[in-house]
Image: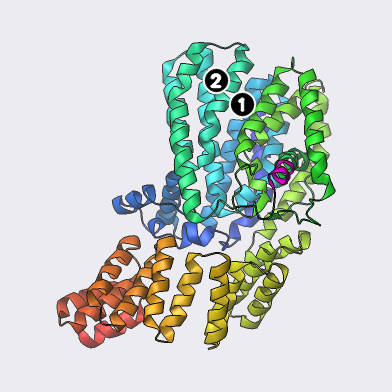
Amino acid sequence: MEWSKNARYWLAIIVLACVVYVPGLSNSFTYLDDHVQVVENPFVRSLNFESIKGIFTTYFVGMYQPVTTIIYAATNTFFGMKPTAFHGLSLLLHIINSFLVFKLLRSFLKSNNLPVVLTAVFVIHPMQVESVAWVSAFSNLLFSFFFLLAFWFYIRYKNEGNIKFWTYCLVLFILSCLSKSAAVIFPIVLFAYDYFSSAKFELKLFFQKIPFLLISLIFGIVTLLGRETAGHLSDLSAAFSSIDRVFLVSNSFLFYPIKFLLPYPLSAFYPYPELTDGHLPSLFYLSPILLIVIALGLFKVRNKKLIIFGSFWFIITIFLVLQFVPFGNQITTDRYIYLPLFGLLLILGSALQKVKESNLLVAAVIPIFILTTTSFQRVQIWQNDQTLWESVIETHPTVSQAYNNLGSFALKQNQSQQAFNYFNQAIQIQPNYADAYSNRGNLYAQAGNSSAAIKDFDTAIRLRPHADAYFNRANEFSNLNRLNEAISDYSESIKLDPRADSYTNRAFAYLKIQKVTLAQQDLKKAQQINPRYARAYFLEGIIEQNIGNKNAACSAFLKAANLGEANARKTYNQNCN
């Protein structure tokens, strides 16, 4: 009878999840990391020893998440590069995570209906949409899965004392770290649970955690190195003082529980606040006071262990994304609440424990309906880049990145004038926005206005030396036959981001000035980075043909043709048949 009742509850929760997220299965990949991490990622194209080796030895978008990337590759292998398959996988994992949340809530709350209601909130809360609807946020779902399952086994180890559960916990923790580096805080959660379950310190519990702490340290170092490589560690000192950062962190901390209780308005992008006469908006200065009031409130309920543990869970799991070390260009983001939400649910569950079981489900109907409707609407904004960034502008009309990304989307739709207008708007809002200058420079280059293009690339590089700007300027120099300048810029681009196209284009420049050996070396590097980069093989074929190696040339042309290079197919048919 109990199983039948739970089955009905679970069917209802799965139906809710499907109502919210199934319409999003037809959403496209977005250029907000999806193409870099999945679509254009050479190691996702196939699943073999070489790709797995590359996955474990490479950062993508400044992140080290090999298990996530392997699952991307497996999805592509079985279903092809179709966004529906990736969205479906995210939805499936979200439902599985909700089952783990339900099991954990049951173990803490000792109630029948309350865990069901709270699990429903976990499944359909609007702040969860970003993690499920955005393909690039799959790492968030995956690391949370291993994290929650590892925690479940730790509870079993504490209750039953069987060492195999401790071993499962450790292995799952490693998998969580390999899925996303945010998992490194897991040992702190275990210490918090030790306090919750016994309220006393035992030395053996500390020694028990040493393997976990060492793993956290290793992955923490790996993460910092990756962030620096990608330029994600932003220096905010020019805009915000150390005192400002205290208020920024305080406000970010409060953002998540406030939006949990009142999820409106939400956005796919939350920009840093603008300074007025050197000052933050007034509400930021109230944040530390409100935090102190909350801390005093927690002190008064310190005998309510469930609230304390829920608070610890939330604080520990949200801590790393509070911009103590600034990275990226957003102050907060919805997806960061995915795992911390469990702590807030524990706090809410503790507050609702006195509500009668018979009244709980009835009282939850209207809030669940509102959350479901809101989430359904938020899934729609992830349909493509246009709907995504237009929704950001509705909430934050001065976000220059939104206009820049709309320009990039318009360009891919062959709407050059519209793209040009968007890039101009981005620059008007933020005159020091390097990416917008680089993108507008590309438009000038396509229009044949080399002087304007190079001027924009110069500005982009002066503002923020980055690989794309050097690469774009190098292409323009190459078109103008300023080959030494082109080679210099390709070299700078390669230093910042060694890509197959950069090596291949530099090889072409080397070939023009008769440095054949250097060109061949670059092509080999390009092929190592991306074994499926057709142009590198086509150019190799041209070199081999020029030096009289017909067999090697034909082999390279055929490989390039099989990888989709139309010119290679034509050249092969003309010279090799």
By secondary structure, the bulk of the magenta-drawn segment is best described as: helix
Say whether disc 2 or disc 1 marks the residue closer to the N-terminus.
1
Residue 203 in percent (x, y) is at 50, 12
Q: Which residue occupies 45% across, 21% down? A: 166
Task: Name the secondary structure under disc 1.
Answer: helix
Specify few, some or many for label 2: CA neighbours under 10 Å numbering under 14, 14-19, or 20 or more: many
Q: Which residue occupies 60% across, 73% down? A: 437
Specify few, some or many for label 1: CA neighbours under 10 Å numbering under 14, 14-19, or 20 or more: some
Quarter of the image with the N terminus in it: top right
Q: Is residue 359 left or right of residue 337?
A: right
Relative to 296, does residue 376 appear above or below in the rendering?
Answer: below
Residue 482 in percent (x, y) is at 40, 84
Q: Is residue 61 visible?
A: no
**For discs 2 and 1, the disc positioned in front in the rendered view:** 2
Residue 375 in percent (x, y) is at 72, 49
Q: Is residue 163 left or right of residue 437?
A: left
Which of these two is toward me, 486 or 403? 486
**Range of magenta residues:** 241-247
Give residue 199's quadrant in the image.
top right
Quarter of the image with the C terminus in it: bottom left
Q: Is residue 127 left or right of residue 546?
A: right
> Do tag 2 and tag 1 residues touch (Cβ < 8 Å)?
yes
Q: Which residue occupies 30% across, 69% down? A: 522
Q: How many marks overall?
A: 2
Indicate which disc residue 155 carries: 2
- Residue picked out by circle 1: 104
Relative to 517, does residue 375 appear above or below in the rendering?
Answer: above
Query: What amino acid is at disc 1?
Result: Leu
Which of these two is toward me, 461 or 413? 461
Q: CA distance from mark 2 to mark 1?
A: 9 Å
Q: Is residue 243 magenta?
A: yes
Query: What amino acid is at disc 2?
Result: Ile
